[in-house]
Image (spheres, rainbow, N blue to C red):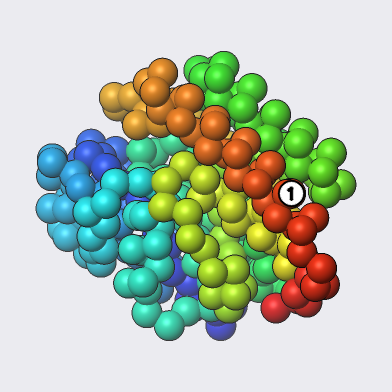
């Protein structure tokens, strides 16, 4: 518990037996529940999570969003949910930066920005960097809202997350959350976080040409589709949660 707020952490993971112990070891001791959302691992990811005392959520349908949704469904009652990747590219010990603005009432959603922090050389591929900047540019042009990153390391007030009714089960999870935050007028804040190259192997998304193409088209498609749908709607946006 942090300042009388119950905190849950969801870690989407797919074959992260080497990196996961480090991720779990760096999670602050004020976190109330840690959930490893296993996305169909064929290695010892689940065994490692059990050994560390984490709860397990199973998401047999592969997809980043599917894993996140499974993790959310497994959380005990809490005030804030934090999402952190299982490949040790994020810095879990910087989690305080994400939850404090929510605890203090300054934000309902806090995004860890790799562009504002120290992103190690090689931690993000060139297509990742380009796609991320293009997505943020389009959001700025369409809605006038400035995001610097669509990074996975983020925290959100639980009641706000419920209100957003997240649906994407694949690559569009992070951008869906940020677009819905705009449409529902959610108080959003960015904080600098550091980012390093994943511990082992290659990213399931940015490590393959197919993954890069699918992620890029999904994210850009989500932005353009949301903009089109908003134009067609006549009712006013929902108020703050």
User: Does residue 209 appear in the picture of this structure?
Assistant: yes
Image point 59% across, 68% down: which residue?
A: 164
Mark 1 is surrounded, within 10 Å at the Cα level, by few (under 14), some (14 to 19) or many (20 or more) other residues, namely some
- Residue 174: percent from left, percent from top: 55, 49
- Residue 143: percent from left, percent from top: 83, 49
Number of numbered discs present?
A: 1
Please, is residue 207 above or below residue 146 in the view? above
**Left or right: where does residue 57 sit relative to residue 111?**
left
Dividing the image into 4 quarters, which one contains the C terminus?
Answer: bottom right
- Residue 147: percent from left, percent from top: 74, 43
**Left or right: where does residue 2 sit relative to residue 202?**
right
Please, is residue 42 above or below residue 180 in the view? above
Image point 59% across, 53% down: which residue?
A: 176
Image point 35% across, 31% down: which residue?
A: 204
User: Does residue 153 appear in the picture of this structure?
Assistant: no
Q: Nearer the viewer, residue 26 or 208?
A: 208
Q: Nearer the viewer, residue 227 or 151?
A: 227
- Residue 77: percent from left, percent from top: 43, 83
The residue tagged with tag 1: helix, strand or loop? Answer: helix
Label 1, on which residue? 227
**Left or right: where does residue 121 sit relative to residue 27?**
right
Please, is residue 29 above or below residue 90 in the view? below
Image point 54% across, 75% down: which residue?
A: 162
Q: Nearer the viewer, residue 8 or 149?
A: 149
Q: Nearer the viewer, residue 66 or 15?
A: 66
């Amino acid at each position: 518990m942090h300042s009388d707020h119950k905190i849950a952490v969801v870690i989407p993971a797919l074959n992260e037996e080497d990196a996961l112990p480090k991720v779990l070891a760096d999670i602050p001791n004020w976190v109330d529940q840690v959930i490893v959302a296993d996305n169909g691992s064929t290695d010892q990811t689940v065994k490692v999570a059990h050994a560390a005392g984490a709860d397990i959520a199973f998401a047999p349908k592969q997809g980043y969003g599917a894993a996140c949704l499974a993790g959310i469904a497994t959380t005990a009652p809490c005030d804030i949910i934090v999402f952190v990747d299982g490949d040790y590219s994020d810095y879990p010990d910087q989690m305080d930066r994400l939850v404090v603005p929510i605890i203090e009432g300054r934000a309902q959603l806090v995004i860890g920005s790799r562009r504002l922090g120290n992103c190690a050389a090689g931690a993000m591929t060139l297509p990742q960097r380009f796609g991320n900047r293009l997505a943020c540019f389009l959001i700025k042009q369409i809605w006038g809202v400035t995001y610097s990153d669509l990074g996975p390391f983020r925290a959100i007030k639980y009641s706000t997350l419920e209100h957003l009714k997240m649906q994407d089960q694949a690559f569009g999870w992070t951008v869906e959350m940020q677009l819905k935050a705009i449409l529902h007028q959610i108080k959003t804040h960015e904080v600098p976080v550091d980012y390093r190259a994943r511990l082992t192997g290659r990213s399931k998304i940015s490590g393959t040409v197919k993954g890069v193409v699918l992620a890029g088209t999904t994210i850009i498609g989500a932005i353009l589709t949301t903009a089109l749908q908003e134009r067609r709607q006549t009712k006013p946006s929902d108020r703050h949660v």
